[in-house]
Each structure stands twice: as structure tokens, then as C-alpha cells.
DNA sequence: GCCAACGTTGGC
DNA sequence: GCCAACGTTGGC
């Protein structure tokens, strides 16, 4: 029996990679490279599966916000950007025979008509347990099904209001 | 730009 | 294995 679908939140600084960039990518698909944190690595390597839902979050942005969603199209595999001595994400600890860092592929699903800003998310009692709101720096974090559903409701009401 | 919170490194 | 020093993240 297949495990049920899981949900995640991926953070990115829009200055380096935004949801607009994801939409413009060929097949609207990219590899989520550059994660260099062990907890996030473990999640990417062991837990994120094809078909899982991803909340796309812009950090260090004005305003910081969940700006859309994506779908996982390839589960964890070695992050080859760690092997490239000339790249920004090079890490000598990792080599092809014994990779340290992992990535997944995600495909754009939707860009929200109205971003769900951090202050707005903080006002939702149903979201108070979100890892995002717990002072966490984790760039790849779990989202519960309840949180996922609630965020989609918020997204809907944001559209209705606009 | 500041700085609190967090993660990692490395001396011991 | 402890923990101080350092580096990074990310909200404000």
C-alpha cells in the first residue's frame, strides 16, 4: 500500500531563485540544489517522494510570503553541484562515490494570485504550529495535511477578496 | 543594516 | 563529548 501524499515547505530568496524563475524553467521543472544543512538533507534524501506537495516560500523578501505551490517530480538523488569546484555550491566533503548532499526535482503547480504573507500566516491560529512560524531556519520543512488544506483555503479567500 | 536565533567547527 | 567562537539565516 502506497504511503499517502506528504507536504513540505521550501524556502528560497527570490533574489537568487523565485517562483517566477520556476515558471520560466523548461517544463517548469528544476532541481532544488544547494541545500547544505543536514536536517534538510535528510528530509530530501529520505522523506520527500514523487507526488508530494511543496509550498514555495520567499524568504528575505518584501514581504516574505508563501507565493505558490509545486509538485515533487523526482525523489532524492545526489546534488552534483557539490562536486563542481568552480560552482557556488561546491563542497569538498562530498564526492560522487560518497555524496553528502541531496536534491529533488520540483515542477511548478501554481502561483498564488495573492501571496500569503508571513504576518498574515501568523494571524492564523490553525497554523501556529507550522515549523515556519517557530523561529526555524530550516530551508526544507514538513507541513501537515491540515496546514496544507488551511493554506489552500486562505489562498482561495485571498482571491475572492481581491 | 542590525542582530537574535540557530547550526557548525574545532580545540581541548 | 563539551562548549566557545564563528558563520549564516532571515525577520524587522
Image (cartoon, coloured by chain):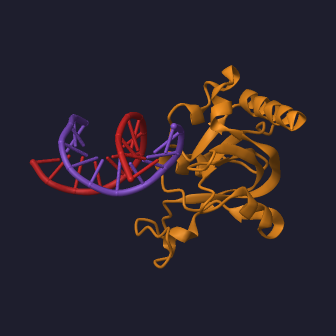
Chain colours: A orange, B red, C purple
Question: Residue B6, image x and y in percent?
Answer: 42, 39
Say which quarter of the image contains residue B5. top left
Q: Quadrant of the N terminus of chain A?
A: top right
Towards the viewer: A113 or A110: A113
Is A57 left, or right, of A137 in this rendering? Answer: right
Report the residue at 67% width, 43% height from top.
A65
Q: Quadrant of the C terminus of chain A?
A: top right
Towards the viewer: A149 or A159: A159
Question: Residue C3, image x and y in percent?
Answer: 20, 37
Say which quarter of the image contains residue A115. top right
Q: Which residue is at the far bottom?
A: A86
Q: How many marks?
A: 0
Question: Residue A160, image x and y in percent?
Answer: 90, 34
Q: Is residue A39 above or below residue A92?
A: above
Q: Is residue A86 above or below residue A30?
A: below
Report the residue at 81% width, 46% height from top.
A112
Question: Residue A20, image x and y in percent?
Answer: 75, 60
Is A42 left, or right, of A112 in this rendering? Answer: left
Amino acid at each position: 500500500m502506497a504511503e499517502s501524499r506528504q507536504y513540505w515547505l521550501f524556502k528560497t530568496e527570490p533574489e537568487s531563485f523565485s517562483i517566477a524563475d520556476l515558471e520560466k524553467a523548461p517544463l517548469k521543472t528544476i532541481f532544488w540544489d544547494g541545500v547544505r544543512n543536514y536536517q534538510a538533507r535528510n528530509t530530501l534524501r529520505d522523506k520527500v517522494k514523487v507526488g508530494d506537495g511543496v509550498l514555495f516560500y520567499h524568504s528575505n523578501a518584501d514581504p516574505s510570503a508563501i507565493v505558490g505551490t509545486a509538485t515533487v517530480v523526482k525523489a532524492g538523488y545526489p546534488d552534483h553541484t557539490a562536486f563542481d569546484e568552480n560552482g557556488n555550491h561546491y563542497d569538498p566533503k562530498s564526492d560522487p562515490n560518497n555524496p553528502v548532499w541531496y536534491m529533488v526535482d520540483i515542477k511548478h503547480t501554481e502561483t498564488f494570485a495573492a501571496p500569503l504573507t508571513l504576518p498574515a500566516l501568523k494571524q492564523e491560529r490553525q497554523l501556529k504550529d507550522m515549523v515556519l512560524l517557530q523561529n526555524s531556519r530550516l530551508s526544507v520543512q514538513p507541513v501537515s495535511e491540515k496546514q496544507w488544506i488551511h493554506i489552500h483555503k486562505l489562498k482561495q479567500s485571498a482571491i475572492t477578496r481581491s
